[in-house]
Amino acid sequence: EPEVTQTPSHQVTQMGQEVILRCVPISNHLYFYWYRQILGQKVEFLVSFYNNEISEKSEIFDDQFSVERPDGSNFTLKIRSTKLEDSAMYFCASSETERTQYFGPGTRLTVL
Amino acid sequence: AQSVTQLDSQVPVFEEAPVELRCNYSSSVSVYLFWYVQYPNQGLQLLLKYLSGSTLVKSINGFEAEFNKSQTSFHLRKPSVHISDTAEYFCAVSDPLTGGGNKLTFGTGTQLKVEL
């Protein structure tokens, strides 16, 4: 069964550094998403992406964040200058028809 | 904006007992409803979903949920739990009419702990 994959599984970085989280969505899916889950809190929507542009973003998704689909298979989330409060589990999800989203295993980001 | 309430943060239950995990959402003309399960140190797995049609939806591992529009609820039930059902369960909702890719709004999760 096709799956969403994410790399790396765990990323440790210093405050102020740039990080890129990578996702490979399910191959025939057209809608892509990033969510995050701060430890002990609920899963929060960050951004949705369709047809090579952002379709919706939350207030969390400020100028420090960007997304890109650099080729036909990868979908990336870049955090330009990480803060301590960016420490969280980041989930990528994809959807074929804008209805049902399938999630990857997540990347745990630790900012020191 | 949509919101989801999962009143029970933890539900302990003995193996083979029935369980109900409650989920209520804020009212909307139309909704898509989902239950996701997160096993320890793993990602979110889709358990079941309601998009339209029959209000009772079932998963392959014995869980079921019923969409109740009048009570704005989507409670998850299982008649007999197994130790392997121990996990965190998240209820989520999206609004198909808002467009923008139908972002999911999640509840705070319910930790189901099955004991022997």
Image (cartoon, coloured by chain):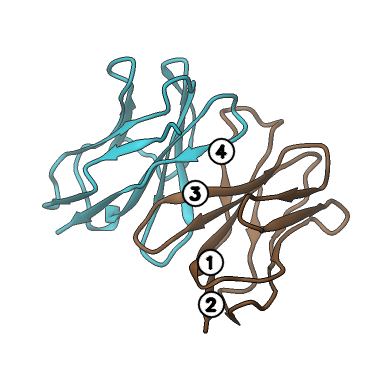
Chain colours: A cyan, B brown
From the image, tell me which residue sits under label 1: B85
Residue named by callout 2: B114
Check whether the beta carbons of the residues at disc 3 and disc 2 lie within 8 A of each other: no
Q: Chain of mark 1?
A: B
Which amino acid does the dot numbered 4 rest on? Lys
Q: CA distance from mark 4 to mark 1?
A: 27 Å
Q: Which mark identifies residue B45? A: 3
Chain-order first, disc 1 or disc 3:
3
Residue position marked by numbered label 4 in the rendering? B103
Residues at marks 4 and 3, CA–CA distance in whole angstroms: 16 Å
Name the residue at the right extreme. Answer: B70
Distance from Cα at disc 1 to Cα at disc 3: 13 Å
Earlier-in-chain disc, 2 versus 1: 1
Q: Position of residue B9 (x, y in %)?
A: 56, 74
Characterize the local packing of mark 3: few (<14), some (14-19) or many (20 or more) Cα atoms within 10 angstroms: some
Q: Nearer the viewer, residue B76 or B104?
A: B76
* Dot 2 and dot 1 residues touching (CB under 8 Å): yes
Residue A87 lies, with reference to residue A7, above or below; the image says below
Which subunit holds the residue at mark 2?
B
Question: Is A89 placed left or right of B80 in the picture?
Answer: left
Left or right of residue A107, residue B48 in this image: right
Whole-percent x, y for residue B63 in the image: 66, 58
Instruction: Bin the neighbour count of mark 2 within 10 Å (Cα to Cα): few under 14, some 14-19, many 20 and up.
Output: many
Chain-order first, disc 4 or disc 2: 4
Residue A82: where, in percent of width, then height? 21, 47
Residues at marks 4 and 3 touching, judged by CB atoms closer than 8 Å:
no
**Element under label 1?**
helix
Above-or-below relation of A99 to B64: above
Q: Dot 2 lies on which element?
A: strand
